[in-house]
Image (cartoon, grey):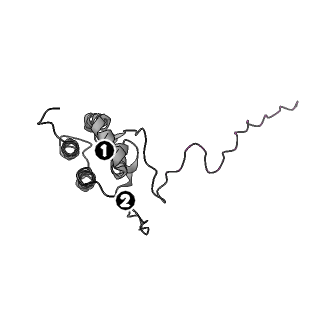
Amino acid sequence: MHADAPSLAERFALIIEALCAAVARRVGPRFLGGLAGPLIILIRARLRRIAARFTRLATHPAPPRRAARPSRPVPVDPFPALRRFASLLRLVPETAALASQLRHLLADSRMKALLEATPELRRTLRPLCRMLGIRAAKSPPSPPGHAIPSREQPAHPIPPRLPPPILSQAPA
């Protein structure tokens, strides 16, 4: 490997900064569908939090937890639309190339080894992958209370559709 090759954390930071720049370019008179300023601030803050957590966990992996912590209330998501699959791609189509870069980084053998060794990194990357439309091959289980309902079986079975009634024509 080349001595000047960037580390995984540096490559990830470059991808996040490029994502932030792409989001910021959506504001402005050039784009008719420009995003609102507060929304861009929220998106960029979320991306930077993910990058900071990734860097922290990649450089200094946390020791395994010994005791369960008491549950904390889940904070209110200021922009729930970003939780949808490929939401950032819909808002900022220019991020498709960066999603490809992230997909390439996740396929790196060093990254795979790091993700296997540090499950917290998988949980950190899950929202980013969801925003960019990247499906993970294996993902860790969701924490209690955050389970995504299965779409295979509806909660209430839908009754079969009945055919329309046949109106008989009586002879007049």
Disc 2 target residue: 77
Q: Is residue 167 or residue 70 the one in the foreground?
A: 70
Q: Quadrant of the N terminus?
A: top left
- The answer to whether mark 2 and mark 1 are in CB contact below 8 A is no
Q: Quadrant of the C terminus?
A: top right
Is 54 displayed left or right of 25 in the figure?
right
The residue at the point 32 percent across, 41 percent down is 113
Q: How many marks?
A: 2
* Residue 75, x across and y down, in percent: 38, 64
Position of residue 53 relative to residue 90, above or below, is: below
Amino acid type for the residue under numbered disc 2: Asp
Disc 1 target residue: 114
Dot 1 crowding, Cα within 10 Å, few <14, some 14–19, many 20+: some
* Residue 48, x across and y down, in percent: 23, 53
Q: Is residue 146 or residue 80 the one in the foreground?
A: 146
Residues in magenta, as a range: 148-172
* Residue 19, x across and y down, in percent: 23, 43
Does residue 92 show up magenta in the picture? no
Mark pair 2, 1: CA separation: 29 Å
